[in-house]
Image (spheres, rainbow, N blue to C red):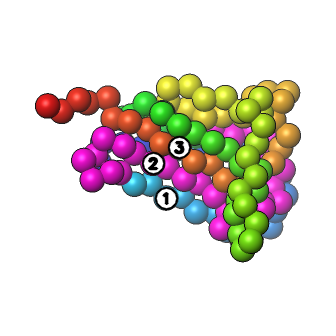
Amino acid sequence: GDFSCTFTYSAQGGTNEQWQMNVGTSEDNALFSCTIWRPQGKSYLFFTQFKAEVKGAKIEHAMAYSQAAVGAQSDIPLKQEEFEITDTTVSHREGKFRFELSKLVIVARSPRDEL
């Protein structure tokens, strides 16, 4: 529809890792979500950089995780200093990011206000 989510990255290692990207909108199309993750939990890729960008919406909430929940384990969030969030992007923070990423969640709001 009116929204898109793009994930670009640079990484080393991790043979045959399976990753998924899910995108969705709320019933009224006001909210857009984009989730990129490794369903098996922790990724063994060595990420040197990453950036997720949304188009058609403004980011309202975003979180990056070093480990995705699997079984009894919970998501483990990155430290706030490791990544940065703008109105349209979530990306690694140079010199602070510790090279681990297993999940990225973005919730964005459509700029349109319908009466």
Mark 1 vs 2: CB contact within 8 A: yes
Three-letter amino acid code of the residue under disc 3: Ile
Magenta region: 25-51
Q: Earlier in the sequence, mark 1 or mark 2?
A: 1
Q: Which residue, given by chain and number where applicable, does mark 1 sit on?
A: 22
Q: How far apart, in angstroms, are the residues tagged by discs 1 and 2?
A: 8 Å
Q: Label 2, secondary structure: give it.
A: strand
Q: Is residue 49 left or right of residue 7?
A: right
Q: Quadrant of residue 45?
A: bottom right
Q: CA distance from mark 3 to mark 1?
A: 10 Å
Mark nearer the N terminus (3 vs 2): 2
Which mark, residue 33? 2
Is disc 1 surrounded by few (<14), some (14 to 19) or many (20+) residues within 10 Å? few
Q: Is residue 50 left or right of residue 61?
A: right
The reply to whether dot 3 and dot 2 touch (C-beta < 8 Å) is: yes
Q: Is residue 41 visible?
A: no
Circle 3 sits on which residue? 106
Residue 30 inside the magenta-drawn segment: yes
Locate residue 106, reporting x and y percent: 53, 43
Residue 94, horizontal then vertical, whole percent:
79, 27
Residue 16: % across, % down: 74, 70
Q: Give the residue at x 26% y 30%.
A: 112
Which image quarter is the C terminus in? top left
Q: Amino acid at mark 2?
A: Ser
Residue at (76, 66) in percent of width and height: 73
Q: Is residue 16 above or below residue 110?
A: below
Alpha carbon separation for disc pair 3 and 2: 6 Å
Residue 108 in view here: yes
